[in-house]
Amino acid sequence: MGEKRIEILLIEDNPGDRRLIREAFDDGKLDVNLHAAQDGVEAVLFLRREGEYADAPRPDLIILDLNLPKKNGHEVLAEIKADEQLRRIPVVILTSSEADADIVRCYNLYANCYITKPADLEQFSGVVRTIENFWFTAVKLPKEE
């Protein structure tokens, strides 16, 4: 396509889910560079380009699980949306929680969408492909300033 590589930050502590998401993006049509953070603290360091992440690219999209060690997904989301440099990066919540309280809290913290992880492998891959198609084909995203 000749377009720039898409940078995605996946914030997910489950190695199996990270692998499934990576495989789904690898099978996709777009050139995706998937970065992974295993906990909320690592994610914030990556996003703020601190420490070993000083040269980290700015993600075009963040996929965030809620159930994370060290700093949970709600805390990470709140930090992202409170930061003037990060708040325009779309955040897709991809989590196992179906709790109404989690859904409401995420939207109150300005999550861009909330998706419950399907248990079925095929559906899980389909959800990732849908995320890719929606956010990088249908949606117009702002350029980094």
Image (cartoon, grey):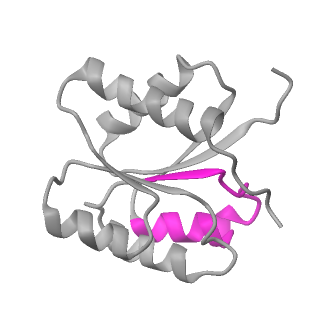
In the figure, 46 relative to 60: above or below?
A: below
Residue 72 appears anywhere in the view: no
Q: Is residue 59 magenta?
A: yes
When the figure is inspected, residue 84 is found, relative to residue 129, above or below; the finding is: below
Location of residue 71 by image quarter: bottom left
Residue 50, magenta (yes or no): yes
Percent across and percent down for residue 122 are 28, 18
Q: Position of residue 99 (x, y in %)?
A: 13, 60
Residue under the image location 57 percent in, 41 percent down: 135
Q: What residue appears at the point 58 percent right and 51 percent down from the top-left corner?
A: 61
The magenta segment is 40-63
Image coords of residue 139 (percent x, y): 62, 43
* Vertical arrangement, residue 8 with respect to residue 75, above or below: above
Question: Closest to the observer: 92 or 64?
Answer: 92
> Which quadrant holds residue 56?
bottom right
Determine whether 78 is above or below 59 in the image. below
Relative to 47, 5 lies left or right? right
Q: Is residue 14 left or right of residue 98?
A: right
Task: From the top left corner, tell me how far across and down residue 19 is, in percent.
Answer: 40, 31
